[in-house]
Image (cartoon, grey):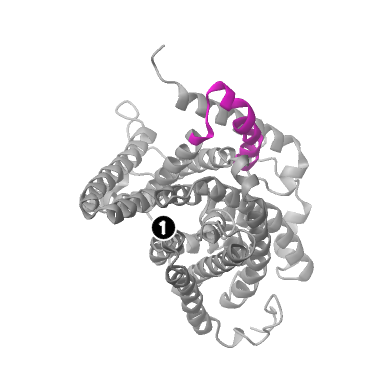
Amino acid sequence: MSIQWTMFINLGIISAGLILATWIRSKVRFFQKFLIPNSLLAGFILLPLYNFVLPKLGLSSVNLGEMAYHLLSISFVALALKTPPKQNVAKGRIFGTTLSVLFQFGVQGFTGLMLTFFFIKTIMPDLFHSFGYLLPLGFSQGPGQAYSIGQSWTAFGVEGAGSIGLTFAAIGFILCSFGGVFIINYGIKKGWIAREKVEFLLDKDLKSGIHKKGSKLPIGSYQTTETEAIDTFTLNMGLVLFGYFLAFLFLTGLEYLLSFIGPAGEQLAATFWGLSFIFAALIGLLIKQFLKATDTQHIMDNLTLNRITGFSIDLMVTSAIAAISLVMVSKYWLPIFTISIIGTIIVGFSTIWFSSRIFRDHRFLRTLLVFGVSTGTLSTGLALLRVVDPDFETPVATDYTYASGLTFVFAIPYILTMNMPLRTYMTGDYKWFWLAVLINIGYILFTGIFFLKLAGKRAFKHKLKLWYPEDDS
Protein backbone atom coordinates (compact mmCIF):
# COMPACT_ATOMS: atom_id res chain seq x y z
CA MET A 1 0.00 0.00 0.00
CA SER A 2 1.43 3.40 -1.00
CA ILE A 3 -0.38 5.35 1.73
CA GLN A 4 2.01 6.49 4.46
CA TRP A 5 1.02 5.37 7.97
CA THR A 6 4.13 6.34 9.95
CA MET A 7 2.67 9.41 11.68
CA PHE A 8 -0.53 7.62 12.72
CA ILE A 9 1.35 4.53 13.86
CA ASN A 10 3.45 6.76 16.13
CA LEU A 11 0.32 8.55 17.35
CA GLY A 12 -1.30 5.20 18.07
CA ILE A 13 1.72 4.00 20.05
CA ILE A 14 1.89 7.28 21.99
CA SER A 15 -1.85 7.04 22.71
CA ALA A 16 -1.44 3.47 23.93
CA GLY A 17 1.34 4.67 26.24
CA LEU A 18 -0.86 7.46 27.61
CA ILE A 19 -3.76 5.07 28.20
CA LEU A 20 -1.51 2.58 30.00
CA ALA A 21 0.05 5.38 32.07
CA THR A 22 -3.42 6.65 33.04
CA TRP A 23 -4.39 3.16 34.22
CA ILE A 24 -1.14 2.77 36.18
CA ARG A 25 -1.53 6.15 37.89
CA SER A 26 -5.14 5.34 38.82
CA LYS A 27 -3.99 2.12 40.54
CA VAL A 28 -0.52 2.80 41.95
CA ARG A 29 -0.41 5.12 44.94
CA PHE A 30 3.29 5.90 44.44
CA PHE A 31 2.58 7.79 41.22
CA GLN A 32 -0.40 9.52 42.84
CA LYS A 33 1.64 10.57 45.86
CA PHE A 34 4.37 12.18 43.79
CA LEU A 35 1.99 13.68 41.20
CA ILE A 36 3.75 12.00 38.29
CA PRO A 37 2.08 13.36 35.11
CA ASN A 38 0.64 10.60 32.93
CA SER A 39 2.49 11.99 29.91
CA LEU A 40 5.83 11.72 31.73
CA LEU A 41 5.14 8.13 32.79
CA ALA A 42 4.02 7.24 29.26
CA GLY A 43 7.22 8.70 27.83
CA PHE A 44 9.40 6.52 30.05
CA ILE A 45 7.30 3.46 29.22
CA LEU A 46 7.91 4.05 25.50
CA LEU A 47 11.56 5.13 25.85
CA PRO A 48 13.11 1.61 25.72
CA LEU A 49 10.72 0.57 22.94
CA TYR A 50 11.81 3.42 20.67
CA ASN A 51 15.48 2.81 21.48
CA PHE A 52 15.73 -0.97 21.18
CA VAL A 53 12.58 -2.53 19.67
CA LEU A 54 10.68 -0.27 17.28
CA PRO A 55 13.73 0.83 15.20
CA LYS A 56 13.99 -2.80 14.05
CA LEU A 57 10.46 -2.38 12.68
CA GLY A 58 11.34 0.81 10.83
CA LEU A 59 10.02 3.29 13.41
CA SER A 60 12.57 5.94 14.34
CA SER A 61 12.55 8.17 17.39
CA VAL A 62 13.52 11.03 15.06
CA ASN A 63 9.88 11.20 14.00
CA LEU A 64 8.90 11.68 17.65
CA GLY A 65 11.32 14.58 18.03
CA GLU A 66 9.81 16.25 15.00
CA MET A 67 6.33 15.65 16.43
CA ALA A 68 7.34 17.34 19.70
CA TYR A 69 8.73 20.26 17.67
CA HIS A 70 5.40 20.84 15.88
CA LEU A 71 3.20 20.24 18.94
CA LEU A 72 5.14 22.87 20.88
CA SER A 73 4.39 25.54 18.27
CA ILE A 74 0.74 24.48 18.04
CA SER A 75 0.37 24.88 21.82
CA PHE A 76 1.91 28.36 21.60
CA VAL A 77 -0.58 29.43 18.90
CA ALA A 78 -3.46 28.18 21.07
CA LEU A 79 -2.14 30.04 24.12
CA ALA A 80 -1.70 33.24 22.09
CA LEU A 81 -5.29 33.08 20.82
CA LYS A 82 -6.78 32.97 24.32
CA THR A 83 -8.57 36.03 25.67
CA PRO A 84 -7.06 37.00 29.04
CA PRO A 85 -9.52 37.21 31.95
CA LYS A 86 -10.85 40.65 32.83
CA GLN A 87 -9.74 40.97 36.44
CA ASN A 88 -8.04 43.51 38.59
CA VAL A 89 -4.48 42.33 38.95
CA ALA A 90 -1.59 43.76 40.90
CA LYS A 91 1.24 44.76 38.60
CA GLY A 92 3.79 44.18 41.35
CA ARG A 93 2.75 40.54 41.68
CA ILE A 94 2.86 39.99 37.92
CA PHE A 95 6.26 41.64 37.52
CA GLY A 96 7.51 39.76 40.57
CA THR A 97 6.49 36.47 38.98
CA THR A 98 8.24 37.45 35.75
CA LEU A 99 11.39 38.40 37.67
CA SER A 100 11.37 35.07 39.53
CA VAL A 101 11.27 33.10 36.28
CA LEU A 102 13.83 35.30 34.48
CA PHE A 103 16.14 34.99 37.48
CA GLN A 104 16.17 31.23 36.92
CA PHE A 105 17.04 31.77 33.24
CA GLY A 106 20.15 33.69 34.25
CA VAL A 107 21.14 31.43 37.14
CA GLN A 108 20.68 28.20 35.20
CA GLY A 109 22.37 29.54 32.07
CA PHE A 110 25.37 30.83 34.04
CA THR A 111 25.66 27.55 35.96
CA GLY A 112 25.44 25.43 32.82
CA LEU A 113 27.98 27.47 30.85
CA MET A 114 30.54 27.61 33.65
CA LEU A 115 30.32 23.87 34.24
CA THR A 116 30.66 23.32 30.48
CA PHE A 117 33.82 25.45 30.52
CA PHE A 118 35.14 23.28 33.36
CA PHE A 119 34.58 20.07 31.39
CA ILE A 120 36.13 21.50 28.21
CA LYS A 121 39.26 22.59 30.07
CA THR A 122 39.64 19.28 31.94
CA ILE A 123 38.36 15.95 30.66
CA MET A 124 36.10 16.72 27.66
CA PRO A 125 37.88 19.19 25.34
CA ASP A 126 35.61 18.27 22.41
CA LEU A 127 32.38 19.17 24.25
CA PHE A 128 30.41 21.80 22.34
CA HIS A 129 30.43 25.14 24.16
CA SER A 130 26.65 25.68 24.19
CA PHE A 131 26.10 22.40 26.09
CA GLY A 132 25.35 24.25 29.33
CA TYR A 133 22.48 26.17 27.72
CA LEU A 134 20.56 22.88 27.56
CA LEU A 135 20.06 23.17 31.34
CA PRO A 136 17.79 26.27 31.18
CA LEU A 137 16.27 25.02 27.93
CA GLY A 138 15.30 21.69 29.48
CA PHE A 139 14.48 22.94 32.98
CA SER A 140 13.00 26.42 32.49
CA GLN A 141 11.52 26.13 29.02
CA GLY A 142 10.55 22.50 28.49
CA PRO A 143 11.11 19.61 26.07
CA GLY A 144 9.77 21.33 22.96
CA GLN A 145 12.14 24.29 23.17
CA ALA A 146 15.04 22.08 24.28
CA TYR A 147 14.59 19.85 21.25
CA SER A 148 13.86 22.50 18.64
CA ILE A 149 16.72 24.82 19.61
CA GLY A 150 19.13 21.93 20.22
CA GLN A 151 18.23 20.42 16.87
CA SER A 152 18.86 23.74 15.13
CA TRP A 153 22.48 23.52 16.28
CA THR A 154 23.11 20.88 13.61
CA ALA A 155 23.69 23.89 11.31
CA PHE A 156 26.81 24.57 13.41
CA GLY A 157 28.07 20.99 13.21
CA VAL A 158 26.65 19.80 16.56
CA GLU A 159 24.93 16.42 16.54
CA GLY A 160 22.57 15.04 19.16
CA ALA A 161 21.90 18.29 21.03
CA GLY A 162 18.16 17.89 20.55
CA SER A 163 18.17 14.51 22.29
CA ILE A 164 20.42 15.82 25.08
CA GLY A 165 18.01 18.72 25.56
CA LEU A 166 15.15 16.24 25.91
CA THR A 167 17.17 14.41 28.56
CA PHE A 168 17.57 17.60 30.60
CA ALA A 169 13.81 18.20 30.20
CA ALA A 170 13.04 14.69 31.46
CA ILE A 171 15.29 15.21 34.49
CA GLY A 172 13.53 18.53 35.09
CA PHE A 173 10.11 16.85 35.03
CA ILE A 174 11.29 14.27 37.57
CA LEU A 175 12.67 17.05 39.76
CA CYS A 176 9.41 18.97 39.45
CA SER A 177 7.32 15.98 40.54
CA PHE A 178 9.44 14.59 43.40
CA GLY A 179 10.99 17.90 44.41
CA GLY A 180 7.65 19.69 44.32
CA VAL A 181 5.99 17.18 46.62
CA PHE A 182 9.01 17.32 48.95
CA ILE A 183 8.75 21.14 49.12
CA ILE A 184 5.03 20.89 49.91
CA ASN A 185 5.57 18.44 52.77
CA TYR A 186 8.65 20.30 54.05
CA GLY A 187 6.80 23.61 53.83
CA ILE A 188 3.92 22.24 55.92
CA LYS A 189 6.38 20.87 58.48
CA LYS A 190 8.30 24.16 58.74
CA GLY A 191 5.19 26.33 58.79
CA TRP A 192 5.84 28.02 55.45
CA ILE A 193 2.15 27.55 54.79
CA ALA A 194 -0.47 27.52 57.55
CA ARG A 195 -1.60 23.99 58.38
CA GLU A 196 -5.27 24.98 58.35
CA LYS A 197 -4.92 26.10 54.73
CA VAL A 198 -3.90 22.61 53.66
CA GLU A 199 -5.98 20.55 56.07
CA PHE A 200 -7.90 19.18 53.11
CA LEU A 201 -4.61 17.97 51.62
CA LEU A 202 -3.60 16.10 54.76
CA ASP A 203 -6.91 14.27 55.07
CA LYS A 204 -8.02 13.64 51.49
CA ASP A 205 -7.43 10.51 49.45
CA LEU A 206 -4.57 10.66 47.02
CA LYS A 207 -5.77 11.61 43.58
CA SER A 208 -5.91 8.91 40.94
CA GLY A 209 -6.03 11.42 38.11
CA ILE A 210 -9.57 10.35 37.12
CA HIS A 211 -12.83 11.79 38.42
CA LYS A 212 -14.84 9.29 40.40
CA LYS A 213 -17.95 7.78 38.90
CA GLY A 214 -20.98 9.93 39.62
CA SER A 215 -18.96 12.97 40.71
CA LYS A 216 -19.75 16.45 39.43
CA LEU A 217 -17.63 16.98 36.35
CA PRO A 218 -16.06 20.35 35.53
CA ILE A 219 -16.98 22.09 32.28
CA GLY A 220 -14.38 21.46 29.59
CA SER A 221 -15.52 23.83 26.86
CA TYR A 222 -18.41 25.93 25.55
CA GLN A 223 -20.04 25.93 22.14
CA THR A 224 -19.62 29.17 20.18
CA THR A 225 -21.05 27.77 16.94
CA GLU A 226 -24.04 25.78 15.77
CA THR A 227 -22.84 22.21 15.45
CA GLU A 228 -24.81 21.59 12.24
CA ALA A 229 -22.69 24.32 10.61
CA ILE A 230 -19.30 23.61 12.17
CA ASP A 231 -18.22 22.17 15.48
CA THR A 232 -16.66 24.67 17.89
CA PHE A 233 -13.60 22.47 18.36
CA THR A 234 -13.14 22.30 14.58
CA LEU A 235 -13.28 26.08 14.25
CA ASN A 236 -10.87 26.72 17.12
CA MET A 237 -8.49 24.02 15.97
CA GLY A 238 -8.74 25.34 12.42
CA LEU A 239 -7.62 28.80 13.51
CA VAL A 240 -4.75 27.29 15.51
CA LEU A 241 -3.52 25.19 12.56
CA PHE A 242 -4.02 28.11 10.17
CA GLY A 243 -1.87 30.25 12.48
CA TYR A 244 0.86 27.63 12.44
CA PHE A 245 0.65 27.45 8.64
CA LEU A 246 1.12 31.23 8.44
CA ALA A 247 4.15 30.91 10.72
CA PHE A 248 5.57 28.32 8.31
CA LEU A 249 5.02 30.65 5.34
CA PHE A 250 6.63 33.54 7.19
CA LEU A 251 9.70 31.49 8.14
CA THR A 252 9.97 30.13 4.59
CA GLY A 253 9.99 33.67 3.20
CA LEU A 254 12.47 34.79 5.84
CA GLU A 255 14.77 31.88 5.01
CA TYR A 256 14.63 32.84 1.32
CA LEU A 257 15.62 36.44 2.08
CA LEU A 258 18.41 35.41 4.45
CA SER A 259 19.86 33.06 1.82
CA PHE A 260 21.13 36.12 -0.08
CA ILE A 261 23.47 36.88 2.83
CA GLY A 262 25.35 33.61 2.39
CA PRO A 263 26.36 30.97 4.97
CA ALA A 264 25.80 33.36 7.89
CA GLY A 265 22.24 33.97 6.69
CA GLU A 266 21.61 30.26 6.31
CA GLN A 267 22.77 29.62 9.87
CA LEU A 268 20.55 32.44 11.14
CA ALA A 269 17.61 30.95 9.23
CA ALA A 270 18.27 27.57 10.84
CA THR A 271 18.20 29.29 14.24
CA PHE A 272 14.86 30.91 13.43
CA TRP A 273 13.41 27.54 12.41
CA GLY A 274 14.50 26.23 15.80
CA LEU A 275 12.58 29.13 17.37
CA SER A 276 9.43 28.50 15.34
CA PHE A 277 7.34 28.50 18.53
CA ILE A 278 8.13 32.21 19.03
CA PHE A 279 6.96 33.08 15.53
CA ALA A 280 3.92 30.82 15.96
CA ALA A 281 2.95 32.72 19.11
CA LEU A 282 3.41 36.09 17.37
CA ILE A 283 1.19 34.96 14.48
CA GLY A 284 -1.39 33.80 17.02
CA LEU A 285 -1.35 37.25 18.62
CA LEU A 286 -1.83 38.87 15.20
CA ILE A 287 -4.81 36.62 14.45
CA LYS A 288 -6.32 37.53 17.83
CA GLN A 289 -5.90 41.23 17.07
CA PHE A 290 -7.55 40.74 13.68
CA LEU A 291 -10.51 38.98 15.30
CA LYS A 292 -10.75 41.76 17.86
CA ALA A 293 -10.64 44.44 15.14
CA THR A 294 -13.44 42.71 13.22
CA ASP A 295 -15.47 42.12 16.41
CA THR A 296 -15.39 38.33 15.91
CA GLN A 297 -13.18 37.34 18.83
CA HIS A 298 -16.19 35.77 20.53
CA ILE A 299 -16.02 32.78 18.18
CA MET A 300 -12.94 31.62 20.09
CA ASP A 301 -13.55 29.71 23.32
CA ASN A 302 -10.85 29.81 25.99
CA LEU A 303 -11.81 26.44 27.43
CA THR A 304 -11.66 24.80 24.01
CA LEU A 305 -8.25 26.39 23.45
CA ASN A 306 -7.23 24.96 26.83
CA ARG A 307 -8.20 21.49 25.57
CA ILE A 308 -6.13 22.02 22.42
CA THR A 309 -3.18 23.20 24.50
CA GLY A 310 -3.53 20.30 26.94
CA PHE A 311 -3.80 17.78 24.10
CA SER A 312 -0.69 19.21 22.44
CA ILE A 313 1.36 19.30 25.65
CA ASP A 314 0.41 15.75 26.70
CA LEU A 315 1.41 14.36 23.31
CA MET A 316 4.50 16.60 23.20
CA VAL A 317 5.83 15.49 26.59
CA THR A 318 5.26 11.80 25.85
CA SER A 319 6.85 11.95 22.40
CA ALA A 320 9.73 14.11 23.68
CA ILE A 321 10.67 11.68 26.47
CA ALA A 322 10.31 8.65 24.18
CA ALA A 323 12.52 10.37 21.57
CA ILE A 324 15.55 10.54 23.88
CA SER A 325 18.52 8.73 22.36
CA LEU A 326 20.05 6.54 25.07
CA VAL A 327 23.17 6.18 22.90
CA MET A 328 23.68 9.95 22.95
CA VAL A 329 22.93 10.10 26.68
CA SER A 330 25.54 7.42 27.36
CA LYS A 331 28.10 9.46 25.40
CA TYR A 332 27.54 12.61 27.50
CA TRP A 333 26.31 11.03 30.73
CA LEU A 334 28.95 12.67 32.97
CA PRO A 335 28.30 16.34 32.05
CA ILE A 336 24.54 15.69 31.81
CA PHE A 337 24.21 14.36 35.34
CA THR A 338 26.84 16.65 36.86
CA ILE A 339 25.16 19.77 35.49
CA SER A 340 21.70 18.40 36.36
CA ILE A 341 22.60 17.59 39.97
CA ILE A 342 24.34 20.91 40.63
CA GLY A 343 21.59 22.74 38.74
CA THR A 344 18.93 20.97 40.80
CA ILE A 345 20.51 22.07 44.09
CA ILE A 346 20.87 25.67 42.90
CA VAL A 347 17.33 25.83 41.48
CA GLY A 348 15.79 24.42 44.67
CA PHE A 349 17.51 26.82 47.06
CA SER A 350 17.46 29.93 44.85
CA THR A 351 13.77 29.59 43.97
CA ILE A 352 12.70 29.38 47.61
CA TRP A 353 15.06 32.15 48.80
CA PHE A 354 14.17 34.57 45.97
CA SER A 355 10.40 33.98 45.85
CA SER A 356 9.80 34.04 49.62
CA ARG A 357 11.19 37.58 49.69
CA ILE A 358 9.84 39.14 46.51
CA PHE A 359 6.21 38.11 47.12
CA ARG A 360 4.06 39.42 49.97
CA ASP A 361 0.86 37.39 49.56
CA HIS A 362 0.32 33.68 48.92
CA ARG A 363 4.10 33.35 49.11
CA PHE A 364 4.25 29.58 49.37
CA LEU A 365 1.82 29.07 46.47
CA ARG A 366 3.73 31.49 44.26
CA THR A 367 7.04 29.88 45.19
CA LEU A 368 5.65 26.45 44.34
CA LEU A 369 4.41 27.64 40.94
CA VAL A 370 7.73 29.31 40.11
CA PHE A 371 9.59 26.13 41.10
CA GLY A 372 7.29 24.09 38.85
CA VAL A 373 7.71 26.27 35.77
CA SER A 374 11.48 26.55 36.42
CA THR A 375 11.92 22.78 36.27
CA GLY A 376 9.19 21.72 33.86
CA THR A 377 6.48 23.57 31.97
CA LEU A 378 3.47 25.72 32.79
CA SER A 379 1.33 22.57 33.01
CA THR A 380 3.61 20.97 35.64
CA GLY A 381 3.76 24.23 37.56
CA LEU A 382 -0.03 24.41 37.61
CA ALA A 383 -0.19 20.75 38.63
CA LEU A 384 1.91 21.54 41.71
CA LEU A 385 -0.17 24.63 42.48
CA ARG A 386 -3.37 22.61 42.19
CA VAL A 387 -2.23 20.40 45.09
CA VAL A 388 -2.50 23.28 47.57
CA ASP A 389 -4.98 25.41 45.60
CA PRO A 390 -7.21 22.78 43.93
CA ASP A 391 -9.85 25.18 42.59
CA PHE A 392 -7.45 28.06 41.79
CA GLU A 393 -9.29 30.25 44.29
CA THR A 394 -6.22 32.45 44.82
CA PRO A 395 -4.99 34.91 42.13
CA VAL A 396 -1.69 33.00 41.74
CA ALA A 397 -2.59 31.15 38.52
CA THR A 398 -4.21 34.24 36.97
CA ASP A 399 -1.19 36.38 37.81
CA TYR A 400 1.07 33.87 36.10
CA THR A 401 -1.13 33.96 33.00
CA TYR A 402 -0.34 37.64 32.63
CA ALA A 403 3.27 37.21 33.74
CA SER A 404 3.93 34.51 31.12
CA GLY A 405 3.34 37.02 28.31
CA LEU A 406 5.73 39.51 29.90
CA THR A 407 8.26 36.74 30.53
CA PHE A 408 8.02 35.70 26.89
CA VAL A 409 8.93 39.22 25.72
CA PHE A 410 11.90 39.51 28.10
CA ALA A 411 13.11 36.02 27.16
CA ILE A 412 13.35 36.69 23.40
CA PRO A 413 16.82 38.34 23.57
CA TYR A 414 18.00 35.51 25.82
CA ILE A 415 16.89 32.83 23.37
CA LEU A 416 18.19 34.67 20.30
CA THR A 417 21.71 34.86 21.80
CA MET A 418 21.95 31.16 22.68
CA ASN A 419 24.00 30.47 19.55
CA MET A 420 26.90 32.66 20.69
CA PRO A 421 28.89 29.84 22.36
CA LEU A 422 28.62 27.86 19.12
CA ARG A 423 30.75 30.50 17.41
CA THR A 424 33.45 29.64 19.92
CA TYR A 425 32.94 25.94 19.10
CA MET A 426 33.42 26.70 15.40
CA THR A 427 36.19 29.31 15.56
CA GLY A 428 37.95 28.78 18.88
CA ASP A 429 37.41 32.47 19.72
CA TYR A 430 36.28 32.57 23.35
CA LYS A 431 34.94 36.13 23.21
CA TRP A 432 31.58 34.74 22.06
CA PHE A 433 31.43 32.29 24.94
CA TRP A 434 32.23 34.93 27.54
CA LEU A 435 29.73 37.30 25.94
CA ALA A 436 27.06 34.63 26.48
CA VAL A 437 28.19 34.31 30.11
CA LEU A 438 27.90 38.11 30.50
CA ILE A 439 24.36 38.01 29.07
CA ASN A 440 23.36 35.54 31.77
CA ILE A 441 25.01 37.70 34.41
CA GLY A 442 23.08 40.62 32.91
CA TYR A 443 19.79 38.78 33.45
CA ILE A 444 20.80 38.03 37.04
CA LEU A 445 21.69 41.69 37.65
CA PHE A 446 18.53 42.93 35.93
CA THR A 447 16.30 40.74 38.08
CA GLY A 448 18.43 41.54 41.14
CA ILE A 449 17.96 45.29 40.78
CA PHE A 450 14.19 45.02 40.56
CA PHE A 451 14.23 42.38 43.29
CA LEU A 452 15.70 44.98 45.63
CA LYS A 453 12.95 47.41 44.65
CA LEU A 454 10.07 44.95 45.17
CA ALA A 455 11.46 43.14 48.21
CA GLY A 456 12.58 46.30 50.00
CA LYS A 457 13.95 45.64 53.49
CA ARG A 458 13.07 41.96 53.12
CA ALA A 459 15.80 41.52 50.49
CA PHE A 460 18.72 40.79 52.83
CA LYS A 461 17.32 41.20 56.35
CA HIS A 462 17.41 37.45 56.98
CA LYS A 463 19.82 36.60 54.18
CA LEU A 464 21.04 33.35 55.73
CA LYS A 465 17.54 31.95 56.15
CA LEU A 466 16.17 29.94 53.24
CA TRP A 467 12.57 31.06 53.84
CA TYR A 468 11.79 34.63 54.91
CA PRO A 469 9.96 34.47 58.27
CA GLU A 470 6.21 34.92 57.98
CA ASP A 471 6.02 37.08 61.13
CA ASP A 472 8.63 39.59 59.94
CA SER A 473 7.13 41.26 56.88
Q: Is residue 473 left or right of residue 266?
A: right
Q: What residue is rendered at 51% in x and 49% in y?
A: 161
Query: Residue 429: x, y in percent?
Result: 43, 68
> For the magenta stretch, what is the residue range?
39-62
Look at the image and tell me in which quarter the N terminus lies: top left
- Residue underneath mark 1: 85
Query: Residue 188: x, y in percent?
Result: 75, 65
* Residue 54 lies within the magenta run: yes
Is 399 rendered above or below residue 452? above
- Closest to the observer, 82 or 338: 338
- Closest to the observer, 169 or 223: 169
Query: Residue 302: x, y in percent?
Result: 41, 47
Instruction: Give the main secondary structure of the magenta stretch.
Output: helix
Is 166 rendered above or below residue 429? above
Mark 1 element type: loop
Q: Callout 1: 10 Å neighbours few (<14), some, many (20+)?
A: few
Q: Is residue 66 left or right of residue 32?
A: left
Is 444 rendered above or below residue 189? below
- Closest to the observer, 253 or 83: 253
Q: What residue is rendered at 46% in x and 77% in y?
A: 446
Q: Is residue 435 left or right of residue 21?
A: left
Q: What residue is rendered at 21% in x and 53% in y?
A: 293
Look at the image and tell me in which quarter the C terminus lies: bottom right
Query: Residue most toward the top?
Result: 1
Q: Is residue 140 left or right of residue 234?
A: right
Query: Residue 467: x, y in percent?
Result: 69, 75
Q: Which amino acid lies under the numbered mark 1 shown in the image of this protein?
A: Pro
* Residue 56 lies within the magenta run: yes
